[in-house]
Amino acid sequence: MVLYGLGAAVSATNQNQRCFEKSTSLGPSYIDELDQSMTDFDGALPLGQTNIFGFYANLSIAQSFIPQKEVLTRTYFLMARNESTTYPCFLALRENLTAENLAMVSVEPSEFPSVNGTPTEEQVAWIEFNFADVWVVPGKTYYLVVYTANITDNYYWISGNGTNIYQNGTVLLSIDDGKTWSEFADADGCFKTYGLYETFLEITMTPSSIKPTIVIKNVGNHTAWDVTVNCTVAGGFVLIGRVFSDSQSELLPGEEMTFQIGPILGFGKVIIRIQVTAANVKETVHEQNAVILLFFIILR
């Protein structure tokens, strides 16, 4: 009811983000996919210090949702800012509204379109909140909490719809800096979440007298993204070859990547530990006992 009538009912579905590569010069290079969303604009609420209820309060907004992918990579809200806004907008991911943050990110006011008064469809934009990737449980409810500093004339506009379009969640409002929340069961924010499906990797080691070969196979149903292999040799007396590593940007289902360890120079009993990680693979570890005789490696 709060959202309903704040703006003309228009459709924002043409602003949907397509799946695209998440990459920076220093960051991941995977292709995440749209998971949950509600994109029908019906109006906007001020986010921050406002007197919308007849008295000044710092309004925070949360959107509950139920992910279907195991890795949550980022989210978007359809937003704008007031011309006088100077403090960042924050987004936190939580398992419940008063729990500690699973992830948190801030976006500077300069990233938002500036408006004077309640924004129209043409004045809002999809703002990306790109936090560190989080493992979540598909089918479980999570909360996206959006807020800003409680400073005079420092507020944003966040879009939504006054009908229950998104069936897997709802909007909640707080006027006391997130201490208590009120649910609006028939309203949703305009939001989108992106993520990755989990997949699984299998590690095997092929014997060799000089350079054993490690084989990493994708035995799951989805592409493994940003695969990293780290190998350490512990124990014995090793002069050369304690640490080895390799990486591959993607590994399709059923495909393999190979990785040779060596040369190693040393003596004695050792443990070869292979650790494999990926953006959508939980840490996988394989340990192999071996004996090193000069350059020769005997697996046991």
Image: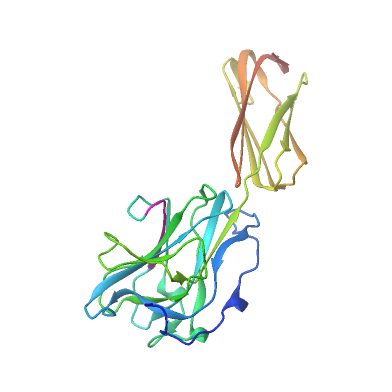
Picture coordinates of residue 46 (x, y %)?
A: 36, 77
- The x, y position of residue 244, in whole percent, is 64, 32
What residue is shown at x 51% (from left), y 60% (from top)?
Answer: 168
Q: Residue at x 59, y 14 (%)?
A: 236
Q: Is residue 258 above or below residue 77?
A: above
Magenta range: 89-96
Give residue 20's quadrant in the image.
bottom right
141, 32: nearer the viewer:
141
Magenta segment: does it hold 51?
Answer: no
209 horizontally vs 60: left or right: right
* Rendered location of residue 258, percent (x, y): 75, 35
Left/right placement of residue 283 relative to residue 42 reads right
Which residue is depicted at the point 73% across and 36% down?
Answer: 217
The residue that appears at 61% across and 19% down in the rendered structure is 271
With respect to residue 294, does 181 lie above or below? Answer: below
Colour mode of the rendering = rainbow
Q: Quadrant of residue 59?
A: bottom left
Where in the figure is residue 150, as x and y percent of width and height?
A: 26, 70
Which quadrant does the N terminus fall into? bottom left
Q: Is residue 187 above or below residue 104?
A: below
Say if the magenta span includes residue 95: yes
Q: Is residue 212 visible?
A: no
| Dominant SS type (magenta) | strand
Q: Is residue 296 left or right of residue 11?
A: right
Q: Quadrant of the C terminus?
A: top right
Taking the view exactly as shown, the residue that stands out farthest to the left is 55
State how many labels appear: 0
Task: Tell me if I can see residue 290 in this picture.
Answer: yes
